[in-house]
Image (spheres, helix red, strand yellow):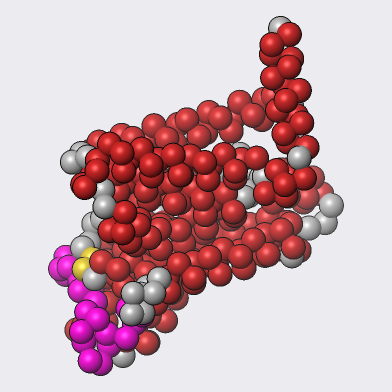
Amino acid sequence: MRVNRKEGEKLEKLKQNPMVKKLGLNRILLVCILVIMFVAFRAALGSKFPVGDSIRSTLNYVYFLGFLSLGVTFVIATGGIDFSIGPVMFCCALVSGYCMTSYGVPCAAAMVLCVLIGLAFGTFNGWMVSYMSVPPFIISMASMNIAKGIASVFTKTQSVSWPLSSDPVNGWFRNIVSYNGFPVGLIIFLAVAVVCGIVLYNTKPGRYILCLGSNSEAVRLSGVNTRKWRMLSYMICGFLVGIAALFFVATYTTVQPGYGDQYNNEAIAGCVMGGTSMVGGLASIGGTVIGVFIISLLQQGIMAFGLGKGQQMIITGIIVIVAVYVDVSARRRKN
């Protein structure tokens, strides 16, 4: 008991440290985990895990997965969930890309269309949850199938390839990811994360979104239009899913219908690992960013070990379970 009491006192002193309070103990621990993971992969794999290539591959994964995680953070903050983000991302990329390659739509217009499709799905999900009282789990499952169906029908089940960087007319759009080797995508992602943090913590809509997750009924009884703010969280999510689709095709070029499910758990794992509570009311944009880096680095390490997609899905699922269990345990101790 004395040992536990001393450990508790040390932990409490650590939490009260000005630097720790400013950065957040959870974020510091996540950064430490990220560094340890990278060192461990490098030590275990050696030449199979080259530093430069591994960092580039991790960043390429971070770009699109990061926007998915930022978007779903807003939804989870309200106490909701959205399992359609992965397929919707693919639907955005497939439909807008097909319009460009088959109907001659200019690249810039196709990019705008890509984001608008994501926003449309977010608006639909938010309207169904907020105004039609459809459970978030049900509507997200339905939207996932609708997104897959629209993408398959519209493209006639064909894969779609966006222009390569060597394309003299439309290759410029890949500059959103990298320009002469400079990671432009990382700058854009971090800038968007800062904006999301400002919106969530320093604006009225953001505060209402967080309050919805804490006590939706109390917020409603205080005269706040809870439906409007809950719907807004899904619209923000849909908008960021459309952005994620652009970064996906700017990195990997080709998209195939019927895919995208695997990125749902990874995006949710990133934001929950970062400190966003699955029951709502608590969200950490900074934690989500670090969590996304951890998930992305983990995927690169798994592939370097030669494990298949099945093993990757198992490990990601375990991470989600552990993250949710830690969140629930912390809530119980706090209560």
> Which residue occupies 31% across, 43% down?
42
Nearest the viewer among 108 and 38 is: 38
Nearest the viewer among 279 and 6 is: 6
Nearest the viewer among 199 and 214 is: 199
Pinpoint residue 253: horizontal percent, then vertical percent: 24, 71
Quadrant of res 183: bottom left
| Left or right of 87 in this view: 287 | right
| Left or right of 45 in this view: 130 | right
Pinpoint residue 280: horizontal percent, then vertical percent: 63, 44
- Image quadrant containing the C terminus: top right
- Image quadrant containing the N terminus: top right
> Which residue occupies 69% across, 11% down?
3
> Which residue occupies 24% across, 77% down?
162
Region in magenta:
153-175
The reply to whether residue 195 is visible in this rendering is: yes
In the rendered image, residue 158 lying in the magenta stretch gets the answer: yes
Nearest the viewer among 171 and 18 is: 18
| Left or right of 248 in this view: 21 | right
The reply to whether residue 261 is visible in this rendering is: no
Quadrant of res 150: bottom left
Pinpoint residue 114: horizontal percent, then vertical percent: 38, 75
Answer above or below: position of 115 versus 65: below
> Which residue occupies 69% across, 19% down?
7
Pinpoint residue 144: horizontal percent, then vertical percent: 36, 54
